[in-house]
Image (spheres, rainbow, N blue to C red):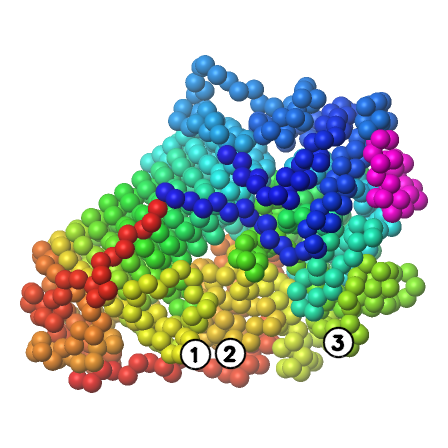
């Protein structure tokens, strides 16, 4: 599993290995003295198995650098994941819990193809675990259960002195599994600029609930192509628990997000399949959106078979775009296109279960959403976007299909919003005497015609499709006018009965959602 | 899952590959021998033999290096830098590189190592910095107008961080903390951090970093304690990583660009322009007439002309250069760690949205209560950029690394610049027209 391909290095190595350079190492490590003891410490957890270093080790016996591999008796400190799980790894670093320095040495020594195995127990760190290599695996002995900050393999960043993340990785072909990250100052697990990321059974949490000092993102793959997040969990983040940002080809399944401002976010992401997740007790449950200025335009997102329950937590974000999420939000899809939301269960979200919103709701200046064609990342296959010459704009929301979701108990308590959450306040005012709020809301922005009662007078230019949603109802809010009208009520909305004509389409205009290519 | 495996850092544009490699390989071969020769005093015969063998074979590299420097560093005869084998990694001790030493008060360099200074330095908790570069004998560095210079394979950049007990007397009582080493390999730059151990009298290769409380008296006479970050090896990349033209992630130096190097330094015979001096020495090529060379604001000028006395034009130049060196290593369109912010603070960015004017922050960060935009022109107090560069709140601070204290001079500058911009309350003028009823 070493990817040291590349002609240049090969040439160098060939020349190098042609001479007895290993003697040099042997010589230097022999000259004894207190210096060597210190140096030896830094290598105690190291187990060199790469071809190159093995050559060196031939003459280097007797130094403290090799960890003896125990075979036979299972090590109680490594009950779940051991170096034996990575037979192809170049070097596997096994680090027992509690030794932060050894862990940081290992992390910073990892080369392409290496593995890092962390022992059972609790490790306090004052700085992040930083890894920069391709083809690496990181595993612990279990993610433990929420409420416990000692179980499994727990990396505890409470003593963090520098502002940094928990685990911070840049590299291709990354696996991280079976560990917990607590109280990271910024993001819990951040994996950036990568192709091929697998995150399994990772729990990221902060000790304090609803604390705006908590770190921003729990599990955060950003600018990743091909990412799988499964069986993982995120709690109490002051921004998003699970945040898939600027990615292409993502599967997010069977995860839990609780106590966050935003439970799960799919941001500026193309080809995402999000299913089997539980988003409960966040401010907003599961959100799909583009932000202005990011060069990857989100599209082809499927949200299905998730449980989105009682996301009524008061918004405790310290600022930023998430500060605008109204408490009681189940899902919104904003500045997005080709999003299919189906077969989910929405229960007890106090403000609304699903909102379909233009990006202009959060950034009213269309120019801010302009992207020049040649700076785009990813593709815009089958996507309808406003353009102006070489500039493409992604504020518009179109081709959204909502069907088969079960709604119950939602929209009954929209009163937790503050002025930071304008939409929440607006809904509370509009529906004040006529609760519950409809379970699926459309802001009507960008429609050429609106009428409060006559379906024929309502356009569906954005191709918003409402299927049958048990227990659900629909309203077109006409936000631009009703938000400016004192005393507007539900009489000023368009609230059609099923089949919700003219929003009764049942397909995207440019073909079905394209699944992620993993 | 299909995965493409790309080798990171493979495509630095550089000198023609073949000659470069050949020479480098030779240098590397000698390097490993050299470390053995440094140890031969202990009686390692084989190492001795090997050294002799290669010493005769590789006369080219040997003769180019001067040998009158041993007394400077106190190293064994024959201690000369010969390169680092990327696979075996750097030597355990900085002295083994044979490039620099520290006598407890001053920095000592080998003859082929040149000091350099920057016009506007990065703020690192008030640490003073000593910068030097080694270019392999016979090799040259190519001047570039705006990018980092083109360095030959084998180049080593040494940056040492130290605190005088009192910054008002920077020559006295210096505590040298670390020396960060950047080495140019055929495919990429690599980072090697060394931490000084003054009991040993040497710096030790240290990948795990450290957060160390450092007490000192600031330039204003006020006592401070920094939680000084000695970065982990991989944390070096937090600032030194960019996307190259082929969109590969590569490591790069930050400072050695024309605009930052274009200044005087006293090399012993009175102040001379650094670029001219290096060109005269023969290792920097392509330097145009000095009036054609861009120049960044010289932060030392603050001593004579405080921000309050600067015109808005001067403040603008100074603030943009301050942002450039302190922020733009991430916040530029090729900055691996900053691109997702879409906030680009490189000095030559002319797009006001990406410069932060009325720009809401994207997917990151804590902006401070009630602040909505990165920069509110005319209103520093309302600008997130000011909040984040000023605050000491972990999780909100910018730059992300290397600052645990407030840089008052820098903040003054940024505030003056933003306050002096034509005011804009950032209320969107482009609200969409409501659809016809």
Q: Position of residue B322 (x, y in %)?
A: 64, 68
**What chain does mark 2 sit on?**
B
Q: Could you say which disc has been placed on residue B394 in the image?
A: none
Q: CA distance from mark 2 to mark 3?
A: 32 Å
Same subunit, labels 2 and 3: the answer reads yes
**Considering only vertical position in the picture, is B131 above or below B287?**
above
10 Å crowding of disc 1: few (<14), some (14-19), many (20+): some
Which sits in the foreground, A374 or A207?
A374
Sequence-earlier tag: 2 or 1: 2
Whether residue A391 is in magenta: the answer is no
Q: Nearer the viewer, mark 2 or mark 3?
A: 3
Chain-order first, disc 2 or disc 3: 3
At x 58%, y 23%, the residue is: A67
Residue B425: x and y in percent read 44, 80
Asked if labels 1 and 2 touch by Cβ distance under 8 angstroms, the answer is yes
Residue B292 image label: 3
Q: Magenta residues?
A: B51-79
The subunit carrying tag 3 is B
Judge left or right: residue A130 versus residue B44. Answer: left
* Residue A137 visible in the picture: yes
In the rendered image, which quarter is residue B327 located in? bottom right
Pointer 2 and pointer 1 on the same chain: yes
Q: What residue is shown with label 1?
A: B426
Residue at the location (36% across, 42% down)? B1
Task: Give the residue drawn at x 42%, y 76%.
Answer: A390
Mark 2 to mark 1: distance in Å? Answer: 8 Å
Q: Residues within 10 Å of mark 3 (few under 14, many from 20)?
A: few
* Spot occupied by residue A383 in the image (x, y as percentages of width and height): 30, 66
As for residue B78 lying within the magenta part, the answer is yes
Q: Would you say B70 lies left or right of A486 here?
A: right
Secondary-structure class at tag 3? helix
């Amino acid at each position: 599993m070493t990817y040291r391909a590349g002609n240049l290095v090969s040439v160098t190595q060939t020349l190098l290995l042609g001479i007895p350079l290993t003697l040099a190492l042997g010589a230097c490590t022999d000259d004894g003295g207190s210096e060597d003891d210190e140096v030896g410490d830094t290598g105690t957890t190291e187990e060199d198995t790469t071809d190159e270093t093995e050559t060196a080790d031939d003459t280097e016996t007797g130094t403290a650098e090799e960890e003896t591999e125990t075979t036979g008796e299972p090590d109680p400190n490594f009950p779940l994941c051991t170096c034996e799980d990575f037979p192809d790894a170049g070097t596997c670093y096994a680090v027992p819990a509690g030794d932060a320095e050894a862990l940081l040495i290992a992390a910073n020594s990892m080369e392409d193809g290496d593995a890092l195995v962390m022992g059972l127990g609790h490790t306090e760190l004052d700085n992040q675990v930083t890894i920069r290599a391709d083809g690496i695996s990181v595993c612990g002995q279990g993610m433990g259960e929420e409420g416990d900050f000692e179980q499994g393999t727990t990396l505890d960043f409470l003593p963090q002195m520098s502002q940094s993340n928990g685990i911070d990785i840049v590299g291709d072909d990354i696996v991280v599994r079976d560990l917990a990250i607590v109280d990271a100052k910024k993001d819990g697990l951040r994996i950036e600029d990568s192709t091929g990321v697998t995150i399994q059974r990772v729990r990221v949490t902060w000790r304090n609930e609803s604390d705006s000092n908590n770190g921003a993102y729990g599990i955060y793959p950003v600018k990743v192509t091909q990412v799988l997040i499964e069986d993982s969990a995120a709690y109490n983040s002051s921004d998003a628990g699970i945040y898939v940002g600027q990615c292409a080809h993502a599967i997010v399944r069977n995860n839990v997000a609780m106590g966050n401002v935003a439970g799960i976010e799919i941001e500026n992401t193309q080809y995402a399949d999000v299913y089997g997740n539980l988003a409960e007790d966040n401010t907003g449950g599961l959100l799909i959106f583009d932000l202005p200025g990011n060069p990857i335009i989100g599209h082809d997102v499927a949200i299905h078979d998730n449980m989105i329950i009682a996301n009524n937590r008061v918004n405790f974000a310290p600022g930023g775009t998430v500060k605008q999420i109204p408490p009681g939000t189940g899902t919104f899809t904003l500045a997005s296109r080709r999003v299919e939301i189906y077969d989910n269960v929405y229960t007890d979200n106090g403000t609304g279960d699903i909102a379909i919103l233009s990006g202009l709701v959060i950034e009213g200046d269309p120019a801010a959403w302009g992207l020049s064609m040649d700076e785009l990342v990813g593709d815009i296959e089958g996507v309808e976007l406003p353009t102006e010459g070489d500039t493409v704009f992604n504020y518009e929301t179109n081709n959204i299909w909502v069907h088969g979701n079960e709604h119950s108990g939602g929209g009954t308590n929209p009163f937790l919003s503050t002025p930071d959450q304008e939409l929440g306040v607006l809904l509370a005012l509009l529906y004040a005497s006529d609760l519950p709020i409809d379970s699926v809301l459309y802001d009507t922005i960008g429609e050429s015609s609106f009428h409060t009662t006559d379906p024929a007078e309502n356009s569906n230019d954005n191709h918003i499709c409402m299927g049958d949603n048990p227990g659900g109802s629909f309203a077109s809010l006409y936000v631009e006018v009703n938000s400016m009208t004192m005393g507007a009520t539900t009489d000023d909305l368009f609230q059609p009965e099923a089949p919700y004509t003219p929003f009764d389409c049942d397909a995207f205009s440019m073909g079905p959602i394209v699944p992620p290519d993993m | 899952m299909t995965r493409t495996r790309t080798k990171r850092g493979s495509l630095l544009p550089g000198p023609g590959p073949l000659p470069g490699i050949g020479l480098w390989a030779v240098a590397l071969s000698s390097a490993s021998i050299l470390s053995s020769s440094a140890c031969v005093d202990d009686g390692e015969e084989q190492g001795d033999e090997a050294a002799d063998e290669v010493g005769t074979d590789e006369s080219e590299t040997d003769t180019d290096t001067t040998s009158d420097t041993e007394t400077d560093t106190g190293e064994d005869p024959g201690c000369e830098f010969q390169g680092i084998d990327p696979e075996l990694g750097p030597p355990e001790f900085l002295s083994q590189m044979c490039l620099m030493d520290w006598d407890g008060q001053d920095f000592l360099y080998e003859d082929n190592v040149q000091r350099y200074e920057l016009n506007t330095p990065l703020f690192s908790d008030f640490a003073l910095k000593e910068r030097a570069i080694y270019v392999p004998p016979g090799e040259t560095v190519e001047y570039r107008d705006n990018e980092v210079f083109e360095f030959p394979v084998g180049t080593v950049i040494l940056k040492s961080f130290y605190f005088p007990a009192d910054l008002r007397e920077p020559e006295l009582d210096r505590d040298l903390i670390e020396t960060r080493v950047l080495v140019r390999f055929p495919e990429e730059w690599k980072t090697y951090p060394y931490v000084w151990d003054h009991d040993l009298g040497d710096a030790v290769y240290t990948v795990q970093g450290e957060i160390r409380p450092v007490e000192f008296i600031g330039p204003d006479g006020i006592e401070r304690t920094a939680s000084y970050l000695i970065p982990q090896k991989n944390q070096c990349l937090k600032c030194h990583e960019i996307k190259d033209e082929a969109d590969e992630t590569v490591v790069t130096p930050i400072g050695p660009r024309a605009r930052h190097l274009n200044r005087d330094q006293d090399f012993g015979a009175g102040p001379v322009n650094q670029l001219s001096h290096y060109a005269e020495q023969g290792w920097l090529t392509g330097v145009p007439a000095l009036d054609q060379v861009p120049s960044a604001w010289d932060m030392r000028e603050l001593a004579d002309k405080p921000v309050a006395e600067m015109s808005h034009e001067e403040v603008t130049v100074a603030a943009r250069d301050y942002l450039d060196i302190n922020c733009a290593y991430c916040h530029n369109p090729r900055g691996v760690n900053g691109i997702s912010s879409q906030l680009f603070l490189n000095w030559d960015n002319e797009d006001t949205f990406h410069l932060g004017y009325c720009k809401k922050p994207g997917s990151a960060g804590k902006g401070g209560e009630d602040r909505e935009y990165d920069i509110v022109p005319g209103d520093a107090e309302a600008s997130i950029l000011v909040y984040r560069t000023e605050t000491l709140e972990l999780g909100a601070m910018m730059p992300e690394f290397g600052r645990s204290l407030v840089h008052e001079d820098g903040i003054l500058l940024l505030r003056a610049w933003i306050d002096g911009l034509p005011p804009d309350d950032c209320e969107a003028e482009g609200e969409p027209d409501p659809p016809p009823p």
